[in-house]
Amino acid sequence: MYDMKALYQAKSVADAVALRLAHPEAQIIAGGSDVLVQMREGKRAGAELISIQTLDEIRGVSVDDDGTLRIGSLTSFSHITRNPLIQKYINVLGEAVDQVGGPQIRNIGTIGGNTCNGVTSADSASTLHAWDAVVELTGPEGVRRQPIRDFYIRAGKVDIREGEIQTAILIPKESYKNCFGHYIKYAMRSAMDIATLGTSVNVRLSADRKTVERARAAFGVAGPVPLRAAHAEALAAGRPVSMELADAFAQAVKEDINPRDSWRAAKDFRLHIAVESARRAFIESVKLAGGEL
């Protein structure tokens, strides 16, 4: 069923790095929800695999001394959704990954695998962009940290260098403190389908809940890689909360996104979805933050 040349089991992060250097053509496998399917379809015949599945040192959610939220790359979607720290600080990420596939996929699929695939439709990708996530990579030169916006190079390609493995996703305290967000996935069907468009918005309001201190908006499947809507974010900053602002914010996202025509949806339809979902996600984020529209 699975045509593979060799399977190497990493005993630690350092061992995984050494195995990557010794076998540069080998594929890292964690949950296997993508790699094993591709192998079964014959797309990776004769592949070498390096399994990191047993590396508990990069599994779980914690808070670093500086307040950074650390999500180990081997943390499964289901564990992210149920984790108390995620629920407290960035509940929208749990809601987003809870829309990945079915329960079986969410039990084995990992946040690291979801981001390392480099696909713009990944349900975690737009939310991680909207919350200024930082990708932690460990390699022969030590630990390297890179903003997630720079981690995605092009469709299906991410910046993982020779010998490196992704070890964590980091959310800086400044990115989640007093912030509230909402994710909307539009798909052809509600279950077991990839996103036709993914929209993630979050806001931080003033102490009196009447002004937007800052807003973030990011999209999946609105370009070859997940992207931020910088014009909409700049427009909302410092403005009074209102339905008029929600409408203007939503229209402004068209300045930054560039969806394509595909068999799933036409470009014009994706643009329409992006505007409407941005408006709805902005309104819901404001409400979650205690604001009134």
Image (cartoon, grey):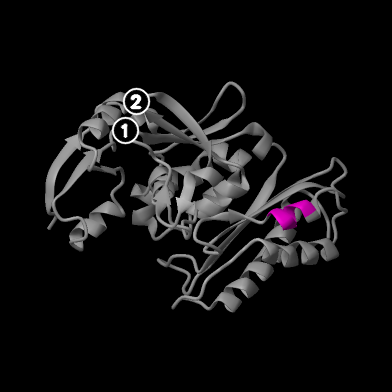
Distance of label 2 from label 1 (alpha carbons): 6 Å
The kind of secondary structure element at disc 1 is loop
In the picture, residue 140 is in which quadrant?
A: top left
Instruction: Read off the magenta span.
Output: 230-234
Q: Main secondary structure of the magenta part?
A: helix
Q: Residue under circle 2?
A: 140
Q: Amino acid at mark 2?
A: Pro
Percent position of residue 271, x then y: 62, 72
Residue lying at 80% horizontally and 55% vertically, measured from the top left: 235
Between 34 and 139, the one nearer to me in the picture: 139
Between 89 and 68, the one nearer to me in the picture: 68
Q: Residue under circle 1?
A: 163
CB contact under 8 Å: marks 2 and 1: yes
Is residue 79 within the magenta segment?
no
Percent position of residue 241, x then y: 85, 55
Q: Amino acid at mark 1?
A: Gly
Percent position of residue 23, x then y: 20, 36
Q: Is residue 180 above or below residue 277?
A: above
